[in-house]
Amino acid sequence: MKKEPLHWLHEQLERLCDSISSTEFSESEKEKMIEWMLEIIAYFETLSEDENGNR
């Protein structure tokens, strides 16, 4: 799998969050999905920080 820059991943997740917001999911479903996206972003930011610290 091609390793993409963190900012690319962040942009894709933001697009996904925008898409979720514009669909007909219930508000609680939208909140949960966006919460998951934010957790994914935080996870990859942590990985990136760890990787930068190990160089």
Image: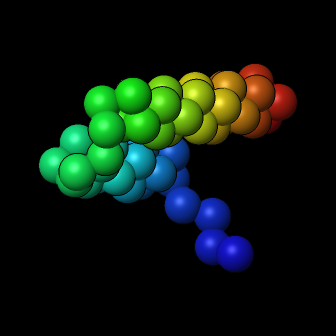
Residue 42 pos. (x, y %): 58, 26
Q: Is residue 3 visible?
A: yes
Residue located 76% across and 27% down the image? 50
Which quarter of the picture shows residue 3? bottom right
Residue 53 pos. (x, y %): 75, 24
Residue located 31% across and 46% down the image? 25
Comparing 6 with 54, the one in front is 6
Comparing 11 with 36, the one in front is 36
Residue 16 pos. (x, y %): 34, 52
Residue located 23% across and 51% down the image? 24
31 left or right of 23? right
Residue that sits furthest to the right in the current view: 54
21 left or right of 39? left
Q: Quadrant of the C terminus?
A: top right
Residue 47 pos. (x, y %): 71, 34
27 left or right of 34? left
> Quick check: 39 above or below 37?
above
Residue located 54% across and 34% down the image? 36
Q: Quadrant of the N terminus?
A: bottom right
Comparing 8 with 17, the one in front is 17
Comparing 7 with 23, the one in front is 23
Q: Is residue 45 visible?
A: no
